Image: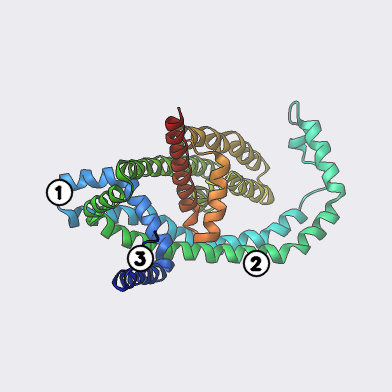
Amino acid sequence: MIPTINTNQLTRITLVLLLITGCFYVLRPLMAAILLSTIICVFTWPLYHSLWSRFGKRDTLAAMMMTLLLLVALILPMAYLAANFADFTATLVNQFQPILQSLQPHAPDWMRNLPIIGGQVSEAWERAAVSHEELMKLVSQYYEPLRTFSLQAVQLVMGGLMQLILVVFIAFFFYRDGARLGAGLMTIAHKLGGELGREVLTLSRGTVRAVMLGIFGTALAQALVALVGFEVAGVPLPLLLAAITFFLSVIPVGPPLVWGGASLWLYGHGEPGWALFMFLYGLLVISTVDNVVKPILISHSSHLPILLVVLGVLGGIVAFGFIGIFLGPTLLAVALTLVKHWIDLHNQKVH
């Protein structure tokens, strides 16, 4: 027998659906900021709880302290990056063509005299110099698209700064009311899925913390190591380059773009020795940090494949803008963990 639905039930269901739809459209422009605020609060909740206990269990005071910490950790570096990135990008693009034009047809004496590899490097240099004119035509052809891309990157960074400000603002209320919100989520999860719902929510919290530790831990370690190299080599604006390395460290080819560009800049300004040092330091030290720290913190802690991290970064940028760099991989990690958990539960029932 087909169950009947009276007019009152149909009205209530319709009103609930309309309410859910309205809430979704209201919050849709802020969804990225809300999600990232949630992730950051979950990741830093042990620190907040420690401050909460230290300040006599005062929710507002502890939330204000955490908000100030987020301002220092997120907003100040991002503001510095946004303030200097435009000038840096314009200078880099304008100097790109003259550096290539200044390349000599023969390798420098110091490079030819390098032990073991000097002859091979000199031959490779001269072979490249043969097609130098064609290379310059190609560079001239793509110069304007490169400049346009650089301007778009500046706009992305400025938009990311505004998004992070909104993230920090929302995080204050999540810290202050987090205990009540968490209890409410647990109640909803239990009503919808019983003990499995509570277990899934707990599993999601652990995955968020593991992935954020891997992403931020790797980014911070690589940025600090890169900062040392930039300072030693005398590269201008080392702090800005380190900040760029921090945000690009999620992408495997991101940091080489920074230290490789710094090496080219040094060579173009008559510092071939420091250019070689910067290249070797980036290849052997900065990239080694990425290859060692990232698999330990991400793959071993949350079992998230590196390919999924890359897909999360690219998809996150397209979907959420600048903050998608960190939001995308985290969401994919949670989804992957829940799918694996569901498969394990199904296999247990089968056996």
Instruction: Mark 2 vs mark 3: give the one in front.
Output: 3
Residue under the image location 42 percent in, 35 percent down = 345
The front one of 151 and 100 is: 151
The secondary structure type at the circle numbered 3 is: loop
Instruction: Mark 3 vs mark 1: give the one in front.
Output: 3
- The numbered mark, 3 or 1, whose residue comes first in the sequence reads 3
Mark 2 to mark 3: distance in Å? Answer: 61 Å
Q: Say whether residue 118 is left or right of residue 227.
A: right
The disc placed on residue 183 is none
- The numbered mark, 2 or 3, whose residue comes first in the sequence reads 3
Residue under the image location 81 percent in, 31 percent down = 119
The secondary structure type at the circle numbered 1 is: loop
State yes or no: discs 1 and 2 in contact (Cβ < 8 Å): no
- The numbered mark, 1 or 2, whose residue comes first in the sequence reads 1
Which residue of the protein is positioned furthest toward the left in this rendering? 56
The front one of 230 and 293 is: 293
Q: What amino acid is found at the position of numbered circle 3 in the picture? A: Thr
Q: Dot 2 corresponds to which residue?
A: 148
Q: Dot 3 corresponds to which residue?
A: 4
Quadrant of image for the N terminus: bottom left
Query: Percent from the top left, x then y, of residue 159?
Result: 48, 65
Mark 3 to mark 1: distance in Å? Answer: 57 Å
Residue under the image location 37 percent in, 63 percent down = 165
Query: Percent from the top left, x then y, of residue 190?
Result: 28, 47
Q: What amino acid is found at the position of numbered circle 2 in the picture? A: Thr
State yes or no: discs 3 and 1 in contact (Cβ < 8 Å): no
Where, by quadrant of the figure, is residue 99 drawn? bottom right
Q: Dot 1 corresponds to which residue?
A: 55
